[in-house]
Each structure stands twice: as structure tokens, then as C-alpha cells.
Image (tube, rainbow, N blue to C red):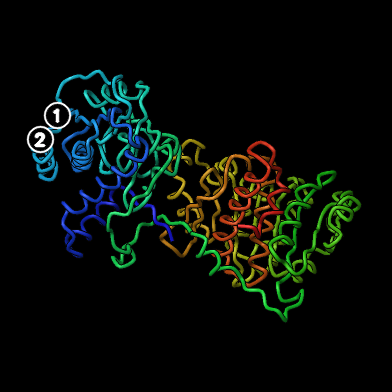
Amino acid sequence: MLYFPTGEEAGIIDKFTIEDIGIPQAVLMERAALGLFDVVTGIIGDDKKKRTLVVVESGNNGGDGVALARLLTVAGYQADIMCLNGLKKRSDAFMTQLKIADNCGVKIHAGKLDIDSYDIIVDGIFGVGLSRPVEGTHREAIEVLNKAEALKIAIDIPSGISSVDGSVMGAAFKADITVTFGFTKLGMLFEPGREYSGKIIVKDIGFPDVTAMGNAPKAYSFEKNDIKRLLPKRAPSSHKGTYGKCLIIAGSRDISGAAYLSAAAAYGMGAGLVRILTEISNRRILAELLPEALLGCYDEDEPEKTNVREAIKWADSIVIGPGLGQGQAAKLLLENVLLYAECPVIIDADAINMMAADREHFDMLLSGGQEGRSIIITPHVLEMARFTGVAVPDIKKTALSLAKETARRHGITVVLKDARTVVASPDEESVYVNVTGNSSMSKGGSGDVLTGIIAALIAAGATPMDAARVGVYLHGAAGDKAREELGEYSVMARDIISFIDNF
């Protein structure tokens, strides 16, 4: 499991490590400096003519930087310290490190320097505890540093980046590399913090297992071993009924691709049986594209003749929405699913937009329905804006809290899709943040593949929350593998399906 603390949560981990575990702060600082030393010397190699400038303020982040400069100097490298001296308060740890550095002959400057003469610039100005906008001397310094042609390295988090949401707090250091300690900080996952952080290198400095604290960070993600543990197992003596039945209600007149991608992905994730319910004009092409699927049809002009309730009763999981349109037939299908489904339902795309357009009606259906039924919605940011009434820029800033609030308010699981997809449950305080996936997946149909993956996992026995989290991880991991094989530009949504089980 990976955890992504905010600055406040990182402070709690620090405090617990020092006070409860008993590791002195000076030891943590030295280990942080050693981690930085490994990165910097790995870049410089044996070329001791290259010059490093460590720019610091007088907090503990600056203390890490001062210790780095001392380690470099003692090892024979050229390393200078520039103290901005823009804060009234100086931490005891910083002052101790400054005295040690001075004793070791490190050059410490307080005025302006010719920064163009340095090959590497290390940002040790502010750490994760920054809570106000960067202004005055600090802003001017960061703006000058950002213009330098040197390789730029940030300590723990780029100065000026919010550890909570990744926003720029007035001004921020733009790093090529960020060396962070123990954990990637939450704000470094989201734009613009993700871009400003550059390549993220996590160094272990001795923090304990955060679950021992009884108060782990609220944002987390999975690693490969977690996925293997949560995946429904496949037994040697199994048959098609063992792995469940997925119903995909998707497609509309002359729109067949979404239905195909969702159904094919369900099979690709291991579903035993997949049934497509789609507009009758799609019958021939879907029968040719996916002969493995059971195929049912409705006529958009006579939707009331569709035996949708029989299909709903048959299913172990249901997808509704991809390419469905928002006409009367689509609305009738969605109403039937919300009223009569007893199995988990994944609501996507047009189905989300229909709910957003008629909130009072569909809120009533969401809160009703069959006992024990669970709902997952999978909106992208614009669909989430329609569903919640929150503007897109505000969703970008509050993705975790908004997903959590929406899940709790409606009693549903929320999969908010973006460059960093988040998954929130109505029953959990923590929020899953996905770290797999890449820009090659930013194409039409990718979301349809995700719905099929989640549906197959549920049909095979996973809980809705586990299916959403594991599904998002596998979807992104398959996209990563597809990019590796096909390139950044060439990946199509259907290619993702081919790599679902190749993570």
C-alpha cells in the first residue's frame, strides 16, 4: 500500500517517529541529507568541478539542504549555501546544521550570487508545512531560480506547491527532480504540483509503518502485490458460470463502439458471460465484432416493448450509459435499472448526464431501488461538474473531498476520472488515488473499457469498492503496458483490453 500525506499528516508522522518511536530529529535529518547526497552525486558522478548551490530558509527543510551541502563539501564536491534569511524564526535543527556546515568549511552566502555559474540548484526554501502564499523576497528568489539553466532539485516538495491539492501558492520552484522522504506528498500527484515536481524520487529515512500510528494518511493507492491479493481467484475446476454474468446496456442508434469496448473489456477481465443490450441497428456489427457476447436489442422508437427487466434479473453486474444517448428510450432503460436491479450497477457517460439533467427524479430513484443494491458512478471531470453543480476548476482543486462528499451524500461509490483518478466510498473516510495510466489513454473509448473491467470484477465476486479500485489500477496499468509496446501516440482504447492481464 502507498500513502500520500498532506503537510499536516506528514507533520504527524514526523512527530510520531521522533516522540513515540524515539528516533531523534537529527538522525532523520541526516538520513534525508544522505538520500539527497545519493541523488546529487549520482548525477554529478566523478566530475567534482561541477558546482551545486543549495538555497535555503531557516526551517527544517533548509536544515536538510544545509546538511546536504556539508556532505558534498566533505566528499570533495563544490557546494555552496545561499541563505535567504527572510524569516524571523529559525528552527533549532537548522541552526545546528548551519553551525556544523560552517565548521566543515562550507561556503555560506547571504547575498546575491551568480547562479548561472552553478550546474545544480537545490531548493530547500520551504517544505510541506507551507500554509501561506509565497511573497516578497522568497517569491523574487524563486522566480530567479526558475530562470536558471541549471538542473533543479527540490527537497521533499517544491517550495510554493500546496501539499494538499498541488496548487501554486503565489510562486513555486519548478524542479526537474524532487527527492521526497518516506512518502510522495499528496499535492505532488495533482496538477500543477505534478508538473512542478518533475521526476519524483522517494527516499526511506526511517519512518515506521504508518498503520502503526492508528491514524494513516487519508489518501492511498495500491501496489502490484495489493492487486494480486484482491483479484478474484480463478479455480481449475471452474466454468463460465463461476465468474459471473455482466449486462452491458450501451450504444444507441448507429453508435456501437462504446457497447463493444465495454463488453469486450468485461470478457478481457475474465467475465464468464457478457450480455449486451443495445439499439437494434447495432445488432449486425456487434455480432461480428464480439460473437462471444449474448446480444439483446431494443428499438428506440418502441422502447416500452423491451424486456429489460428480464435482462436485469439475469445479471450479476450491470453497466449502463456508454454511448446510450439521452432520449426517451435511454431514460426508460435507466429508470428500470435503478428501480429493479438487485446487483451492483455501474453508471457512466450518458446515464450520468441524464441524472444530472433531472436531479430530483433521479435522486429519488438513487435513494430507492432494491434493498442491498449498490451503485458506482464513473464520471470524468465535466460529467462530475454536471452531476454536482461544481465548476470544473473547483473540482480540480477539491477532487478528493468532493468525491468523498458525493459518495456519502448519495450512498454510492464514486470513480472520478482524471489524470489522477480518485475512488471514494460512502463508508470510508480514506480516498483511493490511482497512480497508474498515462496520456496515451486520453482517447475516446478508454472510459468504456474501464466500466467493463469493473463490471467483470464485481460479477466474479469483488465488492463494489474493491472492483472500482482494482479496476482503475488495472485499467491504468494496461494503458502503461500498451504505451510501452505501441508508443505514446498510437494507443487506441481497444488496445488497452489486450493488456489487462499483463501488468
- Tell me what residue is drawn at x 84 percent, y 58 percent: 304
> Which label sits on residue 108?
1
The residue furthest right is: 284
Q: Give the answer, above or below, for where 150 lies relative to 291.
A: above
Query: The C terminus lies in which quarter of the figure?
Result: bottom right
Residue 379 appears left or right of 134: right
Label 1 is placed on what type of residue?
Ile
* Other-residue count near label 1 (Cα within 10 Å), few / some / many at <14 / 14–19 / ≥20: some
Q: Position of residue 47 (x, y in %)?
A: 32, 32
- Tell me what residue is drawn at x 39 percent, y 39 percent: 166
Which of the two discs, 1 and 2, labels the residue nearer the N terminus?
2
Label 2 is placed on what type of residue?
Asp
Q: Position of residue 477 (x, y in %)?
A: 59, 53
Residue 178 appears left or right of 469: left
The residue furthest front is: 46
3D distance between C-alphas at marks 1 and 2: 7 Å
Reading the image, the residue beneath label 2 is 102
Q: Position of residue 24 (x, y in %)?
A: 16, 57
Q: Confirm or deny contact between disc 1 and disc 2 (CB under 8 A).
A: yes
Q: Give the camera-side residue of 500 and 408.
A: 500
